[in-house]
């Protein structure tokens, strides 16, 4: 019998034709540049490359190119950085199955109890107001995750027997939950026969072993509704369809979680032919977020008395061995407290956090020098510790598992920039891992997207403390806004402090045009809460008939300000990552090229917010005098540099 490695070699020896890729292109017309990229991808695969890194500008049409490659290879996983991008893929390509996390779906068992007026969240309370706002009714807090008899599925037993239930060929556990082997191609639905079997199984009220105790809690009306038609758990339904479907899309967080689970249980994430990593410049950030951990007093005090956290005496320079012992002590305390927790919801949070901390401890033990304490937050009055954060510096070993999941990889982004730095940081060796870097040019005319360096002032932390510099910056912004008095726009700052002094010194008429994501101080002046959500801010800007102007340090990515939503944008400062962040500064010291790459990445992403199509146009102004030198000294795409005015 042929093994997995031999099978992969056979698959990789397959020769493709350009006609295969073009016939699988999902739209009627292929742009010349898209055709050129498909040709280069075809040639790369035929030359033995396993991973394609594609840099193509915003508006190029990377998604249909990726879909054509996935359909040609036969099956694919797609990872996106945002829910919005997931929705866009699903809308444009309906055959792609969307997979989301547990917190996105209601738990049907809890729905039954709510309908029967029996559910009370012991954490949020039971009044109508709190029930409306309670998020503990999702599958993330379902009884299937709480080791409760009659709801829990025994994965280990299933690995040996294939079916752990023994009753009508069903698995043990919640009877609303379905499994991968219940679904069939091409419909991705339960067969009518299987659906009927589930209906009978999930509504059996007999006292025999075949009966389900959960049903005894329900009112006759609720039970009657359940008996009309089988409704499967929406989370597992879409997850199973995503595993069976030829093409499915996840967000990074969910995919990385399932990838970790699949190391012990491969069925959690079956292999496919192609892994498509959209917004590939975020692979490092997404992986660090998945592997890192934050421990706060606010969360910890829900489980145990937080005195061990508050009184910890270790600092940034103490050995990781000491911190490992400290984390182990916390884990034991939380673990011992779980059986006595009155709230199932809090207990579930505690179990999840214990699992997360244990995972970090194992990673730390395997390579303690790779970890740092990235942040220690203390109370401003008592000086007690209120928060700890731990991060790995090198996440290449975690990324290796990502790239080994499928036969081929397609990594796409508008901002790969320095491919050597990019590959090094995510653990790819261009030679050994057979990586091909392909760049696409822009269809957007440079005259539609000019970037003007205004050289207003050299800006850094020190100079920005000067009231004179602040006034100079505000005056420059005032002039630009007055020039575009009838147009919408956006001002990109790199901190809320910049936002505040701009609002302070701006003229009244232009200040009234601003729509801000500024964080407002709370009543006790100790914490800061964002006054409005990002979505609320954007809706106000989009729906206003006035020439509103967004201002924020956090709208540099994932924002589509097409056409009249922004005819001008202002970059106050070259967006260097903050050296005040210990993880960032440590990475900078270890690898200066990484720091410049991160800056260039954010710069290009920021400048792309306002020009979203070939016919779109907008003017970009950069105030920081350091901009010209930065773009001269660093690697930026040709299509970006051809828009920069007066810099050679």
Image (cartoon, rainbow, N blue to C red):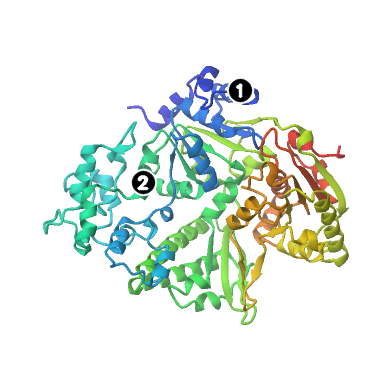
* SS at badge 1: helix
The residue nearer to you, when weighing 518 against 20, is: 518
Q: Quadrant of the C terminus?
A: top right
The residue drawn where x is 67% and y is 40% is 415
Instruction: Report the residue marked by disc 1.
Output: 35
The residue drawn where x is 87% and y is 53% is 456
- Lower sequence index among marks 1 and 2: 1
Q: Residue 29: where, in percent of width, then height?
A: 57, 23
Q: Residue 504: where, in percent of width, then height?
A: 79, 66
Judged from this view, the residue extending furthest toward the bottom is 382
Residue 513 falls left or right of residue 315: right
Query: What label does residue 322 carry, if any?
Result: none
The residue nearer to you, when weighing 333 against 504, is: 504
Tell me if residue 213 comes above or below residue 279 in the rendering. below
Q: Residues within 10 Å of mark 2 (few under 14, many from 20)?
A: some
Query: What label does residue 265 carry, if any?
Result: 2
Judged from this view, the residue extending furthest toward the front is 545
């Amino acid at each position: 019998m042929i093994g997995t490695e031999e099978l992969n070699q056979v698959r990789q020896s397959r020769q493709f034709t350009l006609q295969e890729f073009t016939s699988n292109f999902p739209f009627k017309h292929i742009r010349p540049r898209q055709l050129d990229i498909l040709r280069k991808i075809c040639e790369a695969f035929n030359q033995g490359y396993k991973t394609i890194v594609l840099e193509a500008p915003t508006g190029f049409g990377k998604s249909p190119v990726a879909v054509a490659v996935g359909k040609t290879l036969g099956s694919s996983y797609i990872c996106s950085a945002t829910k919005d991008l997931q929705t866009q893929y699903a809308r444009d390509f309906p055959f792609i199955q969307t997979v989301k996390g547990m917190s996105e779906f209601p738990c049907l068992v809890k729905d039954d109890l709510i309908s029967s007026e029996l559910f009370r969240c012991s954490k949020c309370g039971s009044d109508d107001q709190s029930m409306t706002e309670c998020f503990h009714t999702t599958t993330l807090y379902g009884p299937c995750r709480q080791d409760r008899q009659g709801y829990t599925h025994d994965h280990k037993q299933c690995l040996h027997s294939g079916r752990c239930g023994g009753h009508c060929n069903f698995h043990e556990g919640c009877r609303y939950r379905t499994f991968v082997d219940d679904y069939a191609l091409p419909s991705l639905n339960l067969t009518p026969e299987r659906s009927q079997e589930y209906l009978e199984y999930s509504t059996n009220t007999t006292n025999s072993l075949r009966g389900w105790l959960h049903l005894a809690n329900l009112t006759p009306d609720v039970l009657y509704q359940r008996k009309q038609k089988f409704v499967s758990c929406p989370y597992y339904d879409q997850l199973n369809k995503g595993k069976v479907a030829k093409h499915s899309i996840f967000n990074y967080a969910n995919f990385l979680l399932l990838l970790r689970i699949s190391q012990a249980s491969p069925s959690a994430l079956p292999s496919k032919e192609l892994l498509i990593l959209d917004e590939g410049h975020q692979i490092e950030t997404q992986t660090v977020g998945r592997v890192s951990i934050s421990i706060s007093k606010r969360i910890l005090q829900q489980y145990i008395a937080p005195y061990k956290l508050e009184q910890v005496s270790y600092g940034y320079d103490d050995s990781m061995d000491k911190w490992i012992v400290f984390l182990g002590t916390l884990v034991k305390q939380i673990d011992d407290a779980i059986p006595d927790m009155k709230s199932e919801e809090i207990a579930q949070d505690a179990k999840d956090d214990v699992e997360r901390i244990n995972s970090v401890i194992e990673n730390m033990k395997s390579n303690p020098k790779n970890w740092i304490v990235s942040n220690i937050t203390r109370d401003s009055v008592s000086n007690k510790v209120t928060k700890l954060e731990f991060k790995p510096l090198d996440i290449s070993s975690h990324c290796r598992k990502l790239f080994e999941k499928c036969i081929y990889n397609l990594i796409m982004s508008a901002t790969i920039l320095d491919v050597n730095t990019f590959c090094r940081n995510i653990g790819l060796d261009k030679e050994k891992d057979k990586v091909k870097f392909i760049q696409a040019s822009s269809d957007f005319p440079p005259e539609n997207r000019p970037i003007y360096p205004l050289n207003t002032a050299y800006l850094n932390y020190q100079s920005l403390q000067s009231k004179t510099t602040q006034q100079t910056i505000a005056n420059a912004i005032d002039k630009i806004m007055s020039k575009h008095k009838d147009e919408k726009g956006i001002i990109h700052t790199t901190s809320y402090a910049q936002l505040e002094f701009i609002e302070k010194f701006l003229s009244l008429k232009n200040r009234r045009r601003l729509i801000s994501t500024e964080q407002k101080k709370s009543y006790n002046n100790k914490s800061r809460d964002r006054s409005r959500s990002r979505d609320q801010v954007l809706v106000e800007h989009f729906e206003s008939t006035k020439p509103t102007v967004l201002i924020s340090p956090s709208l540099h990515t994932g924002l589509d300000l097409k056409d009249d939503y922004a005819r001008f944008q202002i970059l106050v400062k070259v967006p260097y990552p903050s050296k005040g962040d210990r993880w960032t500064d440590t990475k900078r010291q270890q690898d200066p090229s990484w720091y410049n790459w991160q800056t260039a990445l954010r710069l290009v992403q920021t400048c792309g917010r306002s020009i979203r199509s070939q016919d779109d146009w907008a003017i970009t102004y950069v105030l920081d005098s350091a901009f010209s030198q930065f773009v001269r000294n660093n690697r930026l795409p040709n299509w970006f540099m051809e828009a920069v005015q007066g810099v050679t």
